[in-house]
Amino acid sequence: MTACFNGIQRHWFSMNQQISALGHIVADFGCGLGHMAIEIAKWVGPGGHVHALDINSEFVTQSRNAHAAGVGDRVTAHQL
């Protein structure tokens, strides 16, 4: 049985924490509002970076909330 966190299964988070290690550069395609990009930015640490990409301009604007989460220097939002 898996528990859900914001609609995403916890085992997915565990797997991605292992993949997105310190210093990695990660692309979050279809980033939506950027919630996952912010979490990944925490996992990759100050030496890593996340490129958050989405086709919806409103989502890209919202994904810039990474600054409020304290990881704005690790996330770059791109509109496709």
Image: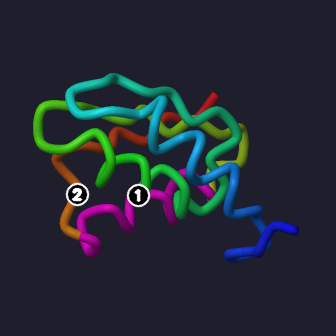
Residue indicated by mark 2: 71
- Residue 16 within the segment the image draws in magenta: no
Q: CA distance from mark 2 to mark 1?
A: 7 Å
In this picture, which residue range is highlighted in magenta?
Answer: 59-69
Where residue 11 appears, as percent x and y from the top left, is: 69, 54
Q: Which residue, as the protein is rendered here, is positioned at the far right?
A: 1
Residue type highlighted by circle 1: Ile
Residue at position x 51%, y 27% from top?
Answer: 27
Vertical placement of residue 32 versus 21, above or below: below
Vertical placement of residue 53 versus 14, above or below: above
Per the rendering, the mark at residue 20 is none
Residue indicated by mark 1: 38
Where residue 19 appears, as percent x and y from the top left, is: 48, 29
Residue type highlighted by circle 2: Val
Figure disc tally:
2
Using the rendered view, name the quadrant where residue 25 is placed. top left
Q: Quadrant of the C terminus?
A: top right
Residue closest to the eye, 26 or 66: 26
Q: Dot 1 surroundings within 10 Å: few (below 14), some, or many (20 or more)?
A: many
Q: Main secondary structure of the magenta part?
A: helix
The answer to the question of whether label 2 and label 1 lie on touching residues, with beta carbons closer than 8 A, is yes
Mark closest to the chain's N terminus, 2 or 1: 1
Residue closest to the eye, 40 or 51: 40
Where residue 50 appears, as percent x and y from the top left, is: 37, 35
Secondary structure under the numbered disc 2 in the rendered image: loop
Where residue 1 appears, as percent x and y from the top left, is: 87, 68
Secondary structure under the numbered disc 1 in the rendered image: helix
Vertical placement of residue 52 versus 10, above or below: above
Q: Is residue 53 left or right of residue 55?
A: left
Residue at position x 69%, y 49% from top?
Answer: 12
